[in-house]
Image (cartoon, grey):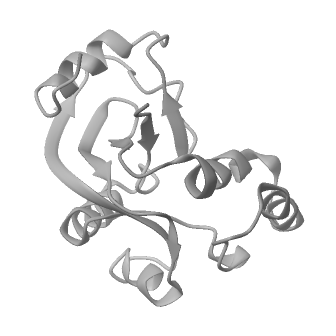
Amino acid sequence: MVRYWVIAPYSYDPRHILDAVWDWSFTNGLITIGWHELGNLSGVSKAVIRKRFLDEFDQEGYQSLQRFWHDIEVGDRVIARGGLKRIVGVGTVAGKPEFDLELGKKVTGGLDDNIHPNFIKLNWLACQRQFPNSAFRGHLKTVSELKNTQKHWPEIRNALREVWQME
């Protein structure tokens, strides 16, 4: 079963960095996230990821990292969000998660020192959509699953029908 993931390609503020990261991600067919301090997590169990994460950071981002490495599968759909109201792009997952520190240093184009070495290959489709309300309020984490039981699902689904053939 195809799952839908909402991923923030970068923090919403400052907006010019988010836009640069999104342009780079779209051009390179990738979605990336940070946490370079944890090293390469390919083949690492959920328990080890959790331990490494909690040794470095607080609980808040652990689930995003775990979802990225263990739950997102080839064929799943990704909705890249820019803030709470904007879809900047949509894509279909085309590969398994990978780690590349050198690639991660290129993501922000030198606009800041944030490194995004964890990435998944995607087949992106252009889709700029602004929503009149905070459609992604329940998706403030870096990576979260979008389910059809959520409040704004009908509105989001209708926007995505233009891009993907959905039932």
Where's residue 115, x and y in %? Answer: 52, 76
Q: In this view, does 133 lie above or below 5?
A: above
* Res. 132 in view: no
Residue shown at 36% from the left, 43% from the top: 78
* Res. 60 in view: yes
Foreground of the two, 90 or 73: 73
- Location of the N terminus by quadrant is top left
Where's residue 138, x and y in %? Answer: 54, 24
Q: Is residue 160 above or below residue 96?
A: above
Q: Is residue 166 above or below residue 99?
A: above
- Location of the C terminus by quadrant is top left
Residue shown at 67% from the left, 52% from the top: 66
Q: Residue furthest bottom?
A: 102
Foreground of the two, 117 or 42: 42
Q: Is residue 150 above or below residue 6?
A: above
Res 83 quadrant in image:
top left
Where's residue 137, x and y in %? Answer: 49, 25
Foreground of the two, 47 or 23: 47
Residue shown at 58% from the left, 46% from the top: 71
75 to the left or right of 64:
left
Foreground of the two, 93 or 139: 93
30 to the left or right of 143:
left
Q: Which residue lies furthest to the front in this view?
A: 1
